[in-house]
Image (spheres, grey):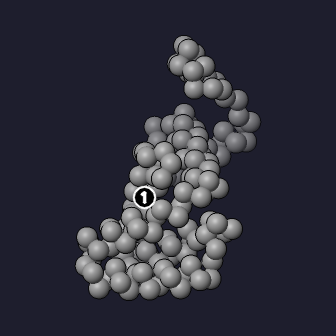
Amino acid sequence: MAEEDIEKDERKWVGVRLSKVMMHQIEMVVNTHPEYAWNGPNDFVRDAVRRHLEYIRRQDMLREGRIESLQPKVEQIIEESLGVEERTRFERELRAIEREIDVAKEPQAFVDALTKLLENTYGQSIAKTISKKLLDMLQTKGSV
Protein backbone atom coordinates (compact mmCIF):
# COMPACT_ATOMS: atom_id res chain seq x y z
CA MET A 1 0.00 0.00 0.00
CA ALA A 2 1.43 3.40 -0.99
CA GLU A 3 1.95 6.06 1.68
CA GLU A 4 -0.84 8.30 0.30
CA ASP A 5 -3.23 5.32 0.37
CA ILE A 6 -2.37 4.70 4.02
CA GLU A 7 -3.24 8.31 4.88
CA LYS A 8 -6.64 7.97 3.17
CA ASP A 9 -7.41 4.66 4.88
CA GLU A 10 -9.73 5.42 7.79
CA ARG A 11 -9.56 1.98 9.44
CA LYS A 12 -8.18 2.01 12.95
CA TRP A 13 -7.89 -1.75 13.38
CA VAL A 14 -7.51 -4.83 11.24
CA GLY A 15 -8.21 -8.38 12.27
CA VAL A 16 -5.79 -11.26 11.95
CA ARG A 17 -6.75 -14.94 12.05
CA LEU A 18 -4.47 -17.36 13.86
CA SER A 19 -4.76 -21.11 14.27
CA LYS A 20 -5.80 -22.43 17.67
CA VAL A 21 -2.39 -24.04 18.11
CA MET A 22 -0.58 -20.76 17.42
CA MET A 23 -2.97 -18.89 19.71
CA HIS A 24 -2.28 -21.34 22.56
CA GLN A 25 1.47 -20.95 21.99
CA ILE A 26 1.14 -17.17 22.15
CA GLU A 27 -0.92 -17.38 25.35
CA MET A 28 1.72 -19.64 26.93
CA VAL A 29 4.51 -17.22 26.02
CA VAL A 30 2.54 -14.22 27.31
CA ASN A 31 1.80 -16.02 30.59
CA THR A 32 5.33 -17.33 31.14
CA HIS A 33 7.16 -14.08 30.29
CA PRO A 34 5.74 -11.24 32.41
CA GLU A 35 9.03 -9.33 31.93
CA TYR A 36 7.79 -8.25 28.48
CA ALA A 37 4.65 -6.66 30.00
CA TRP A 38 2.30 -7.89 27.28
CA ASN A 39 -1.30 -7.41 28.42
CA GLY A 40 -2.41 -10.37 26.34
CA PRO A 41 -2.16 -11.99 22.92
CA ASN A 42 -3.09 -8.75 21.12
CA ASP A 43 -0.11 -6.93 22.66
CA PHE A 44 2.14 -9.85 21.79
CA VAL A 45 1.02 -9.86 18.13
CA ARG A 46 1.41 -6.07 17.80
CA ASP A 47 4.88 -6.29 19.34
CA ALA A 48 5.85 -9.19 17.06
CA VAL A 49 4.67 -7.34 13.95
CA ARG A 50 6.44 -4.13 15.01
CA ARG A 51 9.68 -6.02 15.66
CA HIS A 52 9.47 -7.83 12.33
CA LEU A 53 8.84 -4.58 10.45
CA GLU A 54 11.87 -3.08 12.21
CA TYR A 55 13.95 -6.12 11.18
CA ILE A 56 12.86 -5.73 7.54
CA ARG A 57 13.74 -2.00 7.58
CA ARG A 58 17.21 -2.87 8.88
CA GLN A 59 17.66 -5.53 6.20
CA ASP A 60 16.62 -2.98 3.56
CA MET A 61 19.21 -0.55 4.90
CA LEU A 62 21.88 -3.25 4.69
CA ARG A 63 20.93 -4.05 1.11
CA GLU A 64 21.04 -0.35 0.20
CA GLY A 65 24.59 -0.11 1.52
CA ARG A 66 23.91 2.58 4.09
CA ILE A 67 25.63 0.50 6.73
CA GLU A 68 29.02 1.83 5.61
CA SER A 69 28.25 5.15 7.30
CA LEU A 70 28.14 3.44 10.71
CA GLN A 71 31.91 3.36 11.22
CA PRO A 72 32.45 7.09 11.81
CA LYS A 73 29.40 7.23 14.08
CA VAL A 74 30.63 4.29 16.15
CA GLU A 75 34.10 5.81 16.44
CA GLN A 76 32.59 9.11 17.59
CA ILE A 77 30.49 7.38 20.25
CA ILE A 78 33.51 5.45 21.52
CA GLU A 79 35.74 8.52 21.63
CA GLU A 80 33.08 10.53 23.47
CA SER A 81 32.47 7.78 26.01
CA LEU A 82 35.87 6.06 26.44
CA GLY A 83 38.44 8.46 24.99
CA VAL A 84 40.88 8.65 22.09
CA GLU A 85 42.93 5.57 23.06
CA GLU A 86 39.90 3.28 22.96
CA ARG A 87 38.76 4.81 19.69
CA THR A 88 42.20 4.14 18.19
CA ARG A 89 42.10 0.51 19.39
CA PHE A 90 38.59 0.16 17.99
CA GLU A 91 39.69 1.59 14.61
CA ARG A 92 42.56 -0.91 14.44
CA GLU A 93 40.27 -3.85 15.16
CA LEU A 94 37.64 -2.55 12.75
CA ARG A 95 40.22 -2.24 9.95
CA ALA A 96 41.11 -5.90 10.54
CA ILE A 97 37.43 -6.80 10.17
CA GLU A 98 37.16 -4.73 6.98
CA ARG A 99 40.12 -6.63 5.50
CA GLU A 100 38.28 -9.89 6.14
CA ILE A 101 34.72 -8.87 5.25
CA ASP A 102 33.60 -6.84 2.23
CA VAL A 103 30.73 -4.74 3.61
CA ALA A 104 29.24 -4.30 0.13
CA LYS A 105 29.08 -8.05 -0.47
CA GLU A 106 28.39 -9.28 3.07
CA PRO A 107 26.66 -6.47 4.98
CA GLN A 108 25.10 -8.78 7.59
CA ALA A 109 28.46 -10.43 8.33
CA PHE A 110 29.96 -6.95 8.74
CA VAL A 111 27.19 -5.89 11.14
CA ASP A 112 27.62 -9.11 13.14
CA ALA A 113 31.38 -8.52 13.40
CA LEU A 114 30.85 -4.87 14.33
CA THR A 115 28.35 -5.86 17.03
CA LYS A 116 30.82 -8.43 18.41
CA LEU A 117 33.53 -5.78 18.48
CA LEU A 118 31.19 -3.40 20.30
CA GLU A 119 30.33 -6.16 22.78
CA ASN A 120 34.06 -6.64 23.47
CA THR A 121 34.41 -2.89 24.01
CA TYR A 122 31.24 -2.12 26.00
CA GLY A 123 29.59 -5.39 26.97
CA GLN A 124 26.51 -6.98 25.44
CA SER A 125 23.73 -4.73 26.72
CA ILE A 126 25.50 -1.47 25.91
CA ALA A 127 26.56 -2.82 22.50
CA LYS A 128 22.92 -3.58 21.68
CA THR A 129 21.93 -0.09 22.80
CA ILE A 130 24.62 1.49 20.61
CA SER A 131 23.65 -0.66 17.62
CA LYS A 132 20.00 0.26 18.04
CA LYS A 133 20.86 3.96 18.35
CA LEU A 134 23.00 3.84 15.22
CA LEU A 135 20.31 2.07 13.22
CA ASP A 136 17.70 4.52 14.51
CA MET A 137 19.94 7.38 13.39
CA LEU A 138 20.18 5.85 9.92
CA GLN A 139 16.40 5.36 9.76
CA THR A 140 15.75 8.93 10.92
CA LYS A 141 18.09 10.45 8.35
CA GLY A 142 16.69 8.34 5.51
CA SER A 143 19.74 7.87 3.35
CA VAL A 144 23.17 8.56 4.74
**Hey, which quadrant is residue 125 in on the image?**
bottom left
* Residue shown at the point (53%, 85%) measured from the top left: 96
Locate residue 126 relative to residue 13 in the image: left or right: left
4 or 33: nearer the viewer: 4
Q: Position of residue 14 (x, y in %)?
A: 61, 23
**Up-down relation of residue 60 to residue 4 (above or below):** below
Residue at (47% x, 85% y) in the render: 93
Q: Position of residue 89 (x, y in %)?
A: 38, 86
Q: Is residue 68 left or right of residue 83?
A: right
Three-letter amino acid code of the residue under disc 1? Leu
In the image, 36 versus 61, the foreground residue is 61
Residue 65: image quadrant is bottom right
Identify the residue position indicated by label 1 in the image.
134
Give the quadrant of the N terminus. Answer: top right
Task: Classify 39 as above or below 102.
Answer: above
Query: Dot 1: few (<14), some (14–19), or many (≥20) neighbours within 10 Å?
Result: some
* Residue 27 seen from this side: no
Q: Determine the image quadrant of residue 103.
A: bottom right
